[in-house]
Image (cartoon, rainbow, N blue to C red):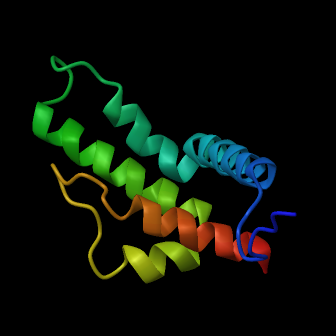
Amino acid sequence: MNNKKSSSMSFTRRRQLDERLRRLTRQCEQRETCQKYLLTKTLTNEQINPQEKEFAEIDTTNCIRRCVSSSCYRDIYQKDPLERGEIDARYSQFKTCWIKEQKD
């Protein structure tokens, strides 16, 4: 009989958590506090310059991360928030932190 370590998460549980995170992210996108950034992000280049649009994208991402988990945001992004042009290489850390919160 093949037993997996008790610390490993089942495929089904991982899928449930992934779906919950996606749903929570969509809910946060709809919150008024993050909506103001999304509105700026959706304007055309004639309505907003590309630099402002890039800043709005970063502000939106930071807002959504704070909304999903303020404690994980604080631990991972607060001292060094995402900046314009930065690829969010810390998202996997954020997601791992959020999953640990769900287990508690």
Residue 21 coordinates in the image, percent (x, y):
65, 51
| Left or right position of 7 against 94 | right
Q: Residue at x 52, y 53 (%)?
A: 33
Seen in the picture, residue 37 relative to 77 is either above or below; the reply is: above
| Left or right position of 35 against 60 | right
Frontmost residue, 62 versus 52:
62
Q: How many marks?
A: 0
Question: Where is the C terminus found, in terms of image quarters?
Answer: bottom right
Residue 25 coordinates in the image, percent (x, y):
60, 47
Residue 89 coordinates in the image, percent (x, y):
30, 59
Q: Residue at x 45, y 82 (%)?
A: 75
Question: Where is the N terminus found, in terms of image quarters?
Answer: bottom right
Residue 22 coordinates in the image, percent (x, y):
63, 43
Frontmost residue, 89 versus 35:
89
| Left or right position of 13 against 38 | right
Frontmost residue, 15 versus 79:
15
Q: Quadrant of residue 54?
A: top left
In the rendered image, the residue lying farthest to the front is 1
Q: Residue at x 79, y 76 (%)?
A: 6
